[in-house]
Amino acid sequence: MVDYGLKNRVAIITGANNPQGIGATTALAFAKEGAKVVLIYKRLFRQFDKNKTDKNGVDRYFAANAGNADIVESRLKKLNADYLVLESDISDEEAVKKIYSTVLERFGRVDILVNNAADGDMEGIDTIEKITQKVIDDTFAVNVRGSILMIREFVNHRGDYGRIINFSTDASQVFAGQITYGASKATLEALTRSIALEVGKYGITVNCVAPGPTQTGWIDEDLEKSVIPLIPMGKLIQPEDIAETILFLASKQARMLTGQVIKVSGGHAL
């Protein structure tokens, strides 16, 4: 087994209430390595049919994102993990400051930040002909402002170990049909490189993971059939695929890897 050197490290992971999601899976992966994990989430309420949440699709996905982190917390308990769960809004500056003060009071340090939380239009209006100011503002508030605020506080409360992992999407540079979401993620890629240059002197690395189509509960059977032919590896990406990449980026072995955008996409959108 690989020793990632994460035992007793403190990792903050945002967007962690979906039991099938990347955030929750990453939190469990860190816990299995002996890290102390902090789960941050905000419930997002969108209409869904309760009768359709028993199988993958938007109804299951919306239901998961509208819930709390109880299921994820129960899994952490089974691992005897040292953890903290906070419901908060990373797009709010004061809320971010409170997150860090709470974490530091509990654990005394923060070593790793995983900026997984994201928002975006799910109504099909994120196109140049239909886009609204609200969609633009809401998307950038979480994906860009929230990520920057979380990074700022991380850097200002840095210790002797620092790993920041941001999230893009594999198609961020050309994302027709989701232009604001794609633009927000492309912005995070640019921020990753710029911030990496600024904080390298502190020994902090900053990298970005860009997942391809990942089964976090939202891809139904019909969509899966249409997407898989576009993935050279021939299958959907799983949250575990992303979590394992994050473990490496957070590890002692990745100490000289910074400013990179790594596509975990099975070859999709290269």
Image (spheres, rainbow, N blue to C red):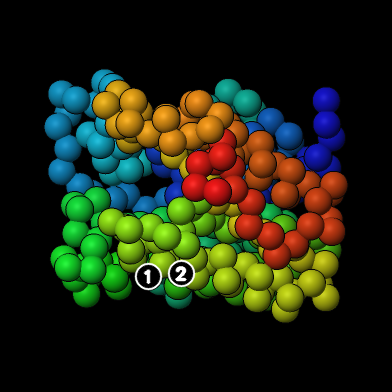
Quadrant in the rendering for residue 161: bottom right
Q: Is residue 29 left or right of residue 18?
A: right
Residue at 79% across / 72% down in the picture? 200
Q: Is residue 12 above or below residue 1?
A: below
Quadrant in the rendering for residue 126: bottom left
Amino acid type of the residue tagged 1 in the rendering: Ala
Residue located farthest toward the top when viewing the structure as drawn: 54
Quadrant in the rendering for residue 27: top right
**Residue neighbourhood size for the residue with mark 1, other residues' Cα within 10 Å, grouped as few (<14), some (14–19), many (≥20):** some
Residue at 33% across / 31% down in the picture? 226
Residue 111 lies, in percent from the top left, at: 72, 57
Amino acid type of the residue tagged 2 in the rendering: Val
Q: Is residue 10 above or below residue 184?
A: above
Residue at the spot of label 2: 144
Residue 211 lies, in percent from the top left, at: 52, 45
User: What kind of element bears circle 2?
Assistant: helix
Viewer can see residue 135: yes
**Residue neighbourhood size for the residue with mark 2, other residues' Cα within 10 Å, grouped as few (<14), some (14–19), many (≥20):** many
User: What kind of element bears circle 1?
Assistant: helix
Residue at 33% across / 43% down in the picture? 65
Question: Which residue is nearer to you in this view: 135 or 115?
Answer: 135
Disc 1 and disc 2: Cα gap in Å? 6 Å
Image quadrant occupied by the N terminus = top right
Question: Which residue is nearer to you in this view: 160 or 248?
Answer: 248
Q: Is residue 214 left or right of residue 192?
A: left
Residue at the spot of label 1: 141
